[in-house]
Amino acid sequence: MNELKEVLRATLGEIDFDPNELKARYLSERDKRLREDANDQYIEVKGDFSNYVDDPYAERIEREPVFDEVEIAVIGGGFGGLMMGGRLREAGYEDLRVIEQGGDFGGTWYWNRYPGAMCDVESYCYLPMLEELNYVPKHKYSFAPEIMAHSKNIAKHYRLYDNALLQTTVTGMTWDDADEKWVIETNRGDRFKARFVAMANGPLSRPKLPGIPGIDSFKGHTFHTSRWDYDYTGGDSAGGLNKLADKKVGIIGTGATAVQCIPHLGDSAEQLYVFQRTPSSVDVRNNRETDPQWRESLEPGWQERRMDNFNILVSGGDQDEDLVADGWTDIFRNLTGVAAKTASRKLGRRLSSVEKGALMEMADYKKMNTVRARTDAIVSDSETAEKLKPWYRQFCKRPCFHDDYLPTFNRPNVELVDTAGRGVDRVTENGVVVDGQEYELDCLIFATGFEVGTSYTRRAGYDIVGKGGQVLSEKWTDGLRTLHGLQTNGFPNCFFLGFTQSAVTVNVPQSLKEQARHVTYILDQIKARNGKTVEATEQGELDWVAEMNSKAKMGEQFRAECTPGYYNNEGKTGNPNGFFSFAYGAGPLRFFEILQEWRNDGTLEGCEIR
Ligand code: NDP
């Protein structure tokens, strides 16, 4: 026991808090929020709510349906689709078609144009294909319009607009057993064939609404943050929402999206009510312009090196230098295996797993104490500051970084309506009710996030029918079954990019980059071997599921003690469709290595080319 104290002191310095008290507080805050209905509390954006996903950014362009054939169809024109398309073009594939629901490329950055939208992972790592396009972002953290413009530039550079079907939603995908091709149907009446399909439909692409009684009765204006209505608010993604000057605005949700747009709403609205269920952890952002000298100094290969350096550090690995040096790498250095390595160096011996666990828990309390202290330091009203404090461990929810969010609560026209973990009681014709008090609103904005934890096919919006009429949703009822997350038996020539039993990375584009590379390799192998189809074998799939299961349980206990959110399936761990049940438990570094080793081996173990 004394030795453990020594380990903690050697690594963290004096412990000036009572960990038992903090743990009890965390658990009681979790208990306040646990709900039996978990994911079912949310409303799907369909039927009466389908207008919430109408595209406010583009006029619908009429066109004739297509009934042709392509070699490769890429479903989704976001970062996954862009990287897939780009890599394929680089490898010489000409006959390809991107199908995208939005009016342009960009995916999440096409839809999420809310004021203040910016990437919260360093742009030099986050924006794809910077060197290929000879581009360096203007800021350390890019704003949404620049990311959207870059997406369009990638599409132009790789000629992905050619043959693309924009403003088009796939409604069905069926394997033709005789022809050995996919038949793709869309909401535009298209029915075309593709030999290969890459699914790049994104993990958090389907907005969701809170199941608040009376939500459909509100007579004022309303929209979801991923479909921002600038006609109503005025201004643009940089703010200046001048049409809100005489409006009472309410926003439900205080996650990563809300943290970015609330400063602009506070700036522009006559009155802003922020309805909070669980506060976010909001740390320092410190965004800055790109240093021209640094830009000039970049050597070929810089982006991949930087991405790798970041990925290693945020996966608990060690690097001599922290190139990104921001809030993300700081958290990981202090709260993960790296902290344990530092402690063990200081003590001159390895730590036991109990010591490691205790160290990380204490480091977490310490870190969250600084986040809470930041709230006190910035928010002048002490009651409001108290309500804005997060009482959970750092990785229970997505950490946020912002320098203008907390100061917004010092504005006289901004009121935090904390619901003490219960959420809003009900919505009326005129506004929102919390604790028996009605807040009259002209406009109610939902910053309530996206579907996670529902089935893959529900989020995609259609089912996939494979060999012999096998339906993907049925195959995956009890959880995903894939080889490396990319292929599944019975569904030949179909590749799943994203978080389907693969690596969950802080820098999502890195994962998509590796997947696009891997799929391109497999397609090259088919060509080299004069094959027609490629399919995961049953054994290959079984082996990967076994590998996933042997590792995936990591973190279950941690998440069970967390306040609910999409990271822990709204408090119901064990959901086979949950966010982390898709994640390879040994982490992204090992996952990328496995893919690399598989390619080096060249035998295509676990899949078959015919
Ligand atoms: P989240 O799911 O993170 O947040 C939804 C918010 O809605 C939560 O605060 C939630 O509260 C609240 N909420 C839900 N139901 C109710 C209710 N009935 N009453 C009151 N509040 C309610 O969605 P976001 O859009 O904020 O973020 C989603 C993800 O998108 C992020 O985690 C991140 O991965 C990504 N993102 C990335 C950005 C980037 O720069 N790269 C920027 C923005 C988002 P509670 O916490 O209690 O559930």
Image: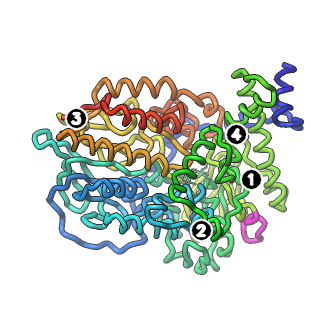
Q: Is tag 4's residue or tag 3's residue first in the polypeptide sequence?
A: 4
The residue stretch that appears in magenta: 407-414
Q: Is tag 2's residue or tag 4's residue first in the polypeptide sequence?
A: 2
Q: CA distance from mark 3 to mark 1?
A: 56 Å
Instruction: Identify which residue, 393 or 125, lies in the foreground.
Output: 125
Please identify, in this view, whether the residue under mark 3 or under mark 1 is nearer the observer.
Answer: 3
User: What amino acid is labelled 4 in the image?
Assistant: Arg
Instruction: Name above or below for residue 372 compared with residue 590.
Output: below
Instruction: Name above or below for residue 135 compared with residue 26.
Output: below
Position of 494 with respect to 597 (left or right) is left
Q: CA distance from mark 4 to mark 3?
A: 46 Å
Quadrant, the N terminus: top right
**Point 77% across, 38% down: residue:** 365
Q: Position of residue 304 (x, y in %)?
A: 51, 52
Question: Which residue does the numbered mark 4 point to in the structure image?
Answer: 393
Q: Is tag 3's residue or tag 2's residue first in the polypeptide sequence?
A: 2
Q: Residue furthest left?
A: 178
Question: Which residue does the numbered mark 1 point to in the structure image?
Answer: 388
Q: CA distance from mark 3 to mark 2?
A: 46 Å
Q: Is tag 3's residue or tag 1's residue first in the polypeptide sequence?
A: 1
* Residue contact between numbered discs 1 and 2, judged by CB atoms under 8 Å: no
Please identify, in this view, whether the residue under mark 4 or under mark 3 is nearer the observer.
Answer: 3
User: What amino acid is labelled 1 in the image?
Assistant: Leu
* Residue contact between numbered discs 3 and 1, judged by CB atoms under 8 Å: no
Q: CA distance from mark 2 to mark 4?
A: 40 Å
| SS for callout 2 | helix
Crowdedness near tag 4: few (<14), some (14–19) or many (≥20) residues, C-alpha within 10 Å: many
Please identify, in this view, whether the residue under mark 4 or under mark 1 is nearer the observer.
Answer: 4
Q: Position of residue 299 (x, y in %)?
A: 55, 60
